[in-house]
Image (cartoon, helix red, strand yellow):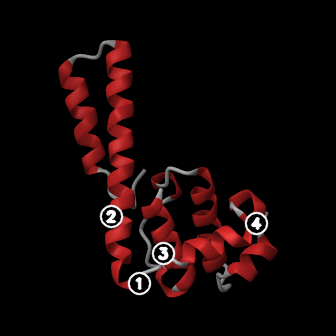
Amino acid sequence: MKVEQAYLGTLLKENHLIKDSSLKEFHFEENRHKQLFKHMKDLTTAGQSVDVVTLSVQVDIQAIGGVSYLNEIITYANAEKVDEYGQLVVDAWKEREKRNILEIARNENWEIGKVIKSLDDINEVKTDDH
């Protein structure tokens, strides 16, 4: 997902933005992006810098795509658009959640009120929740 790559690449290039990120791992669709985001947040919390070198020393870099993948996503970086990228990641997560709810509702034959409440709950989730 290119928007996830752009968001993570921006955080990787501009470390100061990591601590301000209100996104959570679950917002990302790709597992390697979830892992990368977690490692970036963990390194930042520990007071360490986040770059290709520190990530390759601290984590199994191959599990998240290797050095070449990290270098690739940095090419998508745009600090001026980081908020927009973050919102697009959250919007995509909301769409996935809505599809999941509708599938479960269909399979379990939910009443319409329960479906509407569940869909509304997704829109109420703040990035600090969940």
| Marks 1 and 3 in Cβ contact (< 8 Å) | no
List the residue tagged with mark 2. Answer: 87
Q: Cα distance, mark 4 to mark 3?
A: 19 Å
Number of marks in the image? 4
Q: For the residues carrying marks 4 and 3, which lies nearer the camera in this image?
A: 3
Q: Cα distance, mark 3 to mark 2?
A: 16 Å
Q: Which callout, 3 or 2, points at the residue further toward the start of the chain?
A: 3
Q: Is residue 63 above or below residue 79?
A: above
Question: What amino acid type should be assigned to the residue bearing mark 2?
Answer: Gln
Question: What amino acid type should be assigned to the residue bearing mark 1?
Answer: Ala
Disc 2 element: helix
Q: Is residue 94 above or below residue 16?
A: above
Q: Cα distance, mark 2 to mark 4?
A: 27 Å
List the residue tagged with mark 1. Answer: 79
Disc 4 element: helix
Rate crowding at label 3 as few (under 14), some (14 to 19) or many (20 or more) other CA atoms within 10 Å.
Answer: some
Question: What amino acid type should be assigned to the residue bearing mark 4?
Answer: Ile
| Marks 4 and 3 in Cβ contact (< 8 Å) | no
Q: Is residue 4 above or below residue 106?
A: below
| Marks 4 and 1 in Cβ contact (< 8 Å) | no
Disc 1 element: helix
Q: Cα distance, mark 1 to mark 3?
A: 10 Å
**Picture residue at 51% right of the left edge, 66% below the top:** 5
**Picture residue at 60% right of the left edge, 51% below the top:** 31
Rendered image quadrant of residue 67: bottom right
Q: Cα distance, mark 2 to mark 1?
A: 14 Å
List the residue tagged with mark 4. Answer: 61
Question: What amino acid type should be assigned to the residue bearing mark 3?
Answer: Tyr
Rendering coords of residue 73 (x, y %): 56, 71
Q: Which callout, 4 or 3, points at the residue further toward the start of the chain?
A: 4
The label number, if any, that marks residue 76 in the structure image: 3
Q: For the residues carrying marks 1 and 3, which lies nearer the camera in this image?
A: 3
